[in-house]
Image: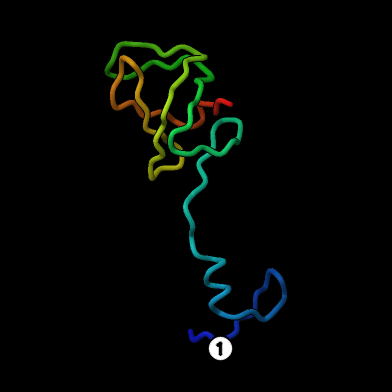
């Protein structure tokens, strides 16, 4: 579509430039949220909201454990993190809450 093309936007009931409509519908980066709905970002610290058994490590991370310096992944339901005793730990966002 050229810049001078217009498209009818059913949501607003108006004719809008095609480039503007395309920009509004383009998928952006997914917002990754914790169990309480807070937005997470790389480097945040999170707290576990329940005890979690770690597969392959024969260890349980207790509720209230603080995980520092998380990294976001392509999957909005998972975060990469490191714990003192577990390397390569991946947690689901439904089990963590952002600190601070």
* Rendered image coloring scheme: rainbow
Residue 48 location (% of width, % of height): 50, 20
Q: Residue 18: x percent and y percent?
A: 56, 79
Number of marks in the rendered image: 1
Q: Position of residue 36 (x, y in %)?
A: 61, 31
**What residue do we see at 52% from left, 85% from top?**
3
Between residues 98 and 75, which one lies in front from this camera angle? Answer: 98
Seen in the image, is 81 located left or right of residue 37? left
| Label 1 element class | loop
Q: Position of residue 22 (x, y in %)?
A: 52, 72
Identify whether 40 is placed above or below 15: above
Q: Which residue does the image show at 44% across and 30% down from the upper left?
A: 92
Image point (39%, 36%), residue name: 71
Image quarter of residue 14: bottom right
In the rendered image, which quarter contains the C terminus? top right
Q: Is residue 16 left or right of residue 23?
A: right
* Apparent side of residue 45 relative to residue 13 in the rendered image (left or right): left
Q: Which residue is mark 1?
A: 4
Position above or below: 8 against 83: below
Please name the residue shown 45% across and 38% down the image. Answer: 77
Mark 1 crowd level (few <14, some 14–19, many ≥20, 10 Å Cα)? few
């Amino acid at each position: 579509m050229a810049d001078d093309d217009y498209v009818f936007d059913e949501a607003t009931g108006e004719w809008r430039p095609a480039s503007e409509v395309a920009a509004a519908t383009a998928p952006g980066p997914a917002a990754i949220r914790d169990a309480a709905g807070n937005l997470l970002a790389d480097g945040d610290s999170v707290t576990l909201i329940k005890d979690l058994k770690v597969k392959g490590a024969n260890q349980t991370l207790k509720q209230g454990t603080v995980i520092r310096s998380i990294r976001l992944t392509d999957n909005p339901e998972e975060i990469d993190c490191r714990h003192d005793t577990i390397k390569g730990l991946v947690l689901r966002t439904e089990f963590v809450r952002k600190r601070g």
